[in-house]
Image (tube, rainbow, N blue to C red):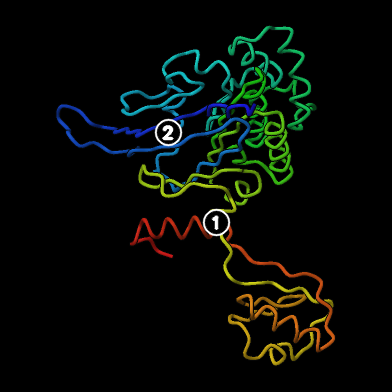
Amino acid sequence: MIDAPAPPIIQVRNLHKVFGKSLFKKKGFPALCGVDLEVGRGQVFGLLGPNGAGKTTLIKVLLGLTRGWTGEAEIFGRPPLDPLSRQKVGFLPEAHRLPPYLTGRQVMHLFGMMAGGNSDEVKARIGPLLEKVNMTSSADRKIREYSKGMQQRLGLAQALVHQPEIVFLDEPTDGVDPVGRASIREMVLDLKERGVTVFINSHLLMEVELICDHVVIMDKGKILVQGSIDELTPRTGAVEIDLSETPEDIEEVLNGVGRGFKLRDSGFQLELNEDEMDKVIDRLRQRGLSIRSITPRRLTLEQAFIGLIKEDQPGMRP
């Protein structure tokens, strides 16, 4: 007997939210315009879009932090305004503020208790979490002494202290150095392995491309496209061929085959169809050149993102 698939943690249908609408102002500003999406268990889900796209509004709706929306929204099968829907949720908001008069360890304990944790169990989790975000040595310093990056790493740790089943991370690597970003990526992937769903809103598209399973791109309150990284970053038709040695006359060797030749440090890039690929390989072998690798080129997530936003905003400057 085949087990039925687990229901999604988040379900949204035809979600609308308008700000500024009143008896005296009939239209207002539409922040969400008919949003539909589902987020499954154990996914790393990326939410992308330019400023004002509606990303933070969507998160606030799901967390019960804004009212006056229409449509359907559920988290763990409950409406967002039901407090029970948030019991298994961790949240790192953008530009969060931690009590400056407490130490990092005290903040962790406070947030764990506020989430309904047992004091002894919360204390037992604090040490390992601080170690994962490289904050052990600063755990007993006051928050006011922390840099922005240190506060961000501690903020991530506090979002996990009550062992949530879904974690919302709003710009989690903002102000974090490269070492800290790598540490956060490792934590996200570890959460995924443990079946925790991670919902990321970020402007750092390279970070999203490295860790997300599913991505939604929004603009003007609407979802423009959604899918896996592979689906959103299709092949460009170009192929990068790495050679053990590149002769000076490589363009002459390839003359008449393919388009868009670009010389690389250890080979070249060329736009080819399948028949042309065979011809290129034959010519390289006839010349006695050793092929080390052949790599189809794909759009980066950043290229796909910019292309979509330009289509949605025709007057946008390149």
Q: Residue furthest left?
A: 24
Q: How many angstroms separate mark 1 from mark 2 (CA)? A: 22 Å
241 with respect to 227 (left or right): right
The reply to whether discs 1 and 2 touch (Cβ–Cβ < 8 Å) is no
Q: Is residue 70 left or right of residue 207?
A: left
Foreground residue among 219 and 240: 240
Q: Quadrant of residue 301?
A: bottom right
Looking at the picture, which amino acid does disc 1 mark?
Glu
Say what amino acid the circle numbered 2 marks: Leu
What residue sits right under mark 2 in the picture? 58
> Residue 195 location in percent, x, y?
67, 29
Element on which disc 2 rests: helix
- Left or right of 72, for residue 135: right
Choose the circle earlier in sequence order: 1 or 2: 2
Q: What residue do we see at 44% from left, 65% from top?
A: 318
Quarter of the figure that contains the N terminus = top right
Which residue is labeled 1 in the image? 302
Compared with 11, 64 (above or below) is: above
